[in-house]
């Protein structure tokens, strides 16, 4: 790839409280699923790079866990540190908030941004849900009063509203630099990581409100054969009672999760998939940093 002298490349951290649409935004601008998405907070637990490359620029989006107040457990503290680390390393920050609801956790993020040395663009997301539209102007004015943002851009990540405008705006805030990643690379995460995340997404969508925070998924084996992909994955929970909930009566929950995950993985890779899921107990893994490291969590 021949690179012009004015080529731009940089890291763009996508920051905000849980559940404001950060991962939905990144998937939308990438045109593919890079991060899993559910309606439950703290679905994103890892720092995930999404690399968007053109002939003029390479934008490296950094999807981060939502910054949240309740950080009593080791996993929550690690998630907050992961988001803070991405903020410190960014050339540009996109602060995402929900146009329909402002919370104390949004205020917490604003306090962090006051100490940020990078340029910050505010994205007012979910504007498709704002009624009447005059309220949108109030939201923009309120946001403007909270911090001196370089720009405030109303968007709907779900409906793809105004994302083209955002993508045209970003390069001007990035340094002149050759690309940092190959042109055909779209994420820094492995195939095994994405498959484990798909399984976790299906579990999160199917299980009760509290349980998804007590489980994680690891792919133990991935083999590509002529007949398709063979995958073995372990679902780790913290207690025996959780294991029963994940398996379900007569194994029904695990079967439904496995089927939904298998169909999505098969569609993504264009080949048949044989997926075996096992549920195992590891006591209090989410409150033990060594266990978290062993289970693939970043510990910045």
Image: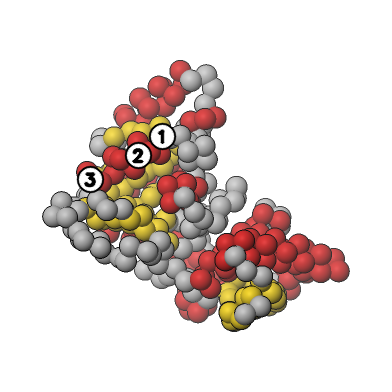
Give the mark, 3 or 2, whose residue is nearer the N terminus.
2
The answer, for residue 27, to whether it is visible in the render is yes
Q: Is residue 152 above or below residue 286?
A: above
The answer, for residue 26, to whether it is visible in the render is no
Q: Is residue 35 above or below residue 153?
A: below
Nearer to the camera, 54 or 176: 54
* Image position, residue 217 (x, y; %): 60, 70
Name the side, left or right, on which 49 lies relative to 286: left
Residue at horizontal 34 percent and vertical 43 percent from the top? 167
* Image position, residue 57 (x, y; %): 26, 52
Q: Is residue 119 above or below residue 215?
A: above
Answer whether labels 2 and 1 touch (C-beta < 8 Å).
yes
Marks 3 and 2, Cα distance to the nearest angstrom? 12 Å
Give the mark, 1 or 3, whose residue is nearer the N terminus.
1
Residue at horizontal 57 percent and vertical 66 percent from the top? 269
Q: Which residue in the structure is indicated by mark 1?
A: 162
Residue at horizontal 71 percent and vertical 67 percent from the top? 258
**Which SS class for mark 1?**
loop
**Which SS class for mark 3?**
helix
**Which SS class for mark 2?**
helix
* Image position, residue 265 (x, y; %): 61, 65
Question: 10 Å neighbourhood of mark 1: few (<14), some, or many (≥20)?
Answer: few
Nearer to the camera, 205 or 180: 180
- The mark found on residue 173 in the picture is 3
Answer whether labels 1 and 3 touch (C-beta < 8 Å).
no
The N terminus lies in quadrant:
bottom left
Marks 2 and 1, Cα distance to the nearest angstrom? 7 Å
Q: Which residue in the structure is indicated by mark 2?
A: 166
Question: 10 Å neighbourhood of mark 3: few (<14), some, or many (≥20)?
Answer: some
Answer whether labels 3 and 2 touch (C-beta < 8 Å).
no
């Amino acid at each position: 790839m021949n690179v012009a002298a004015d080529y731009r490349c940089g890291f763009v951290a996508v920051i905000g409280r849980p559940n404001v649409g950060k991962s939905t935004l990144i998937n939308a601008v990438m045109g593919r699923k890079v991060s899993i998405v559910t309606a439950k907070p703290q679905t994103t637990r890892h720092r995930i790079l999404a690399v968007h490359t053109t002939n003029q620029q390479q934008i490296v989006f950094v999807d981060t866990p939502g910054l949240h107040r309740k950080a009593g457990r080791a996993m929550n503290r690690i998630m907050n540190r992961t988001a803070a680390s991405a903020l410190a390393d960014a050339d540009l920050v996109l602060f995402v908030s929900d146009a329909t609801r402002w919370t104390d956790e949004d205020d917490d993020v604003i306090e962090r941004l006051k100490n940020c040395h990078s340029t910050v663009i505010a994205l007012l997301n979910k504007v498709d849900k704002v009624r009447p539209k005059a309220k949108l102007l109030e939201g923009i004015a309120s946001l403007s009063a909270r911090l001196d943002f370089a720009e405030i851009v109303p968007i709907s990540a779900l409906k793809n509203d105004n994302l083209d405008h955002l993508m045209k705006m970003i390069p001007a805030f990035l340094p002149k630099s050759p690309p940092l990643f190959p042109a055909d690379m779209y994420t820094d995460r492995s195939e095994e990581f994405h498959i484990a995340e798909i399984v976790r997404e299906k579990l999160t969508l199917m299980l009760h409100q509290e349980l998804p925070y007590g489980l994680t998924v690891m792919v133990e084996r991935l083999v590509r054969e002529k007949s398709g992909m063979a995958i073995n994955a372990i679902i780790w929970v913290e207690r025996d009672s959780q294991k029963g909930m994940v398996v379900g009566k007569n194994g029904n929950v695990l079967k439904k999760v496995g089927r939904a995950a298998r169909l999505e993985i098969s569609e993504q890779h264009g080949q048949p998939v044989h997926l075996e899921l096992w549920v195992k107990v590891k006591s209090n893994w989410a409150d033990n940093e060594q266990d978290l490291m062993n289970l693939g969590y970043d510990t910045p």
